[in-house]
Image (tube, helix red, strand yellow):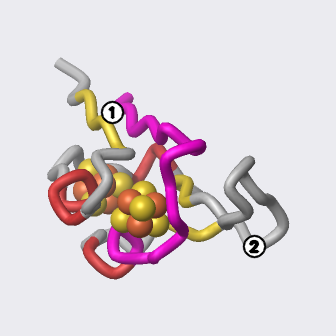
Amino acid sequence: MNKVSFNEERCKGCGLCADACPKGIVVILTEKLNSKGYHPAAVSEPEKCIACAMCATMCPDSVITVEKDI
Ligand code: SF4
Ligand code: SF4
């Protein structure tokens, strides 16, 4: 399965990655806070990820790493 990882502590919860995902599977975890006080982003249904890396490309803080399953 493709893998999307988030460096949560660097995330500002801006939501750009969620807006960019063509599968609509990137979400902001409103119930969670990182140490900077932001709600971090995460992938809700990783099995639907197509590893397009749009989320990682859009992130201004290089929070996201996408690994394509080969
Ligand atoms: S790699 Fe593409 S499909 Fe997967 S979470 Fe990121 S934007 Fe969505
Ligand atoms: S674009 Fe980057 S900083 Fe903004 S919510 Fe997504 S992972 Fe966090």
> Residue 15: horizontal and vertical position, in percent?
44, 76
> Residue 13: horizontal and vertical position, in percent?
54, 69
Is 46 situated above or below 27? above
Residue at 57 percent across and 44 percent down: it is 8
Q: Residues within 10 Å of mark 1 (few under 14, many from 20)?
A: some
Name the image quarter holding the N terminus.
top left
Q: Is mark 1 within 8 Å of ligand 1?
A: yes
Query: Which stretch did the figure color magenta?
Result: 1-18
State yes or no: residue 43 in magenta.
no
Residue under numbered circle 1: 2
Image quarter for ligand 1:
bottom left
State yes or no: residue 13 in magenta.
yes
> Residue 30: horizontal and vertical position, in percent?
75, 73
Residue at 61 percent across and 59 percent down: it is 40
| Number of the label disc, if any, that sits on residue 34 | none
Label 1 sits on what residue type?
A: Asn
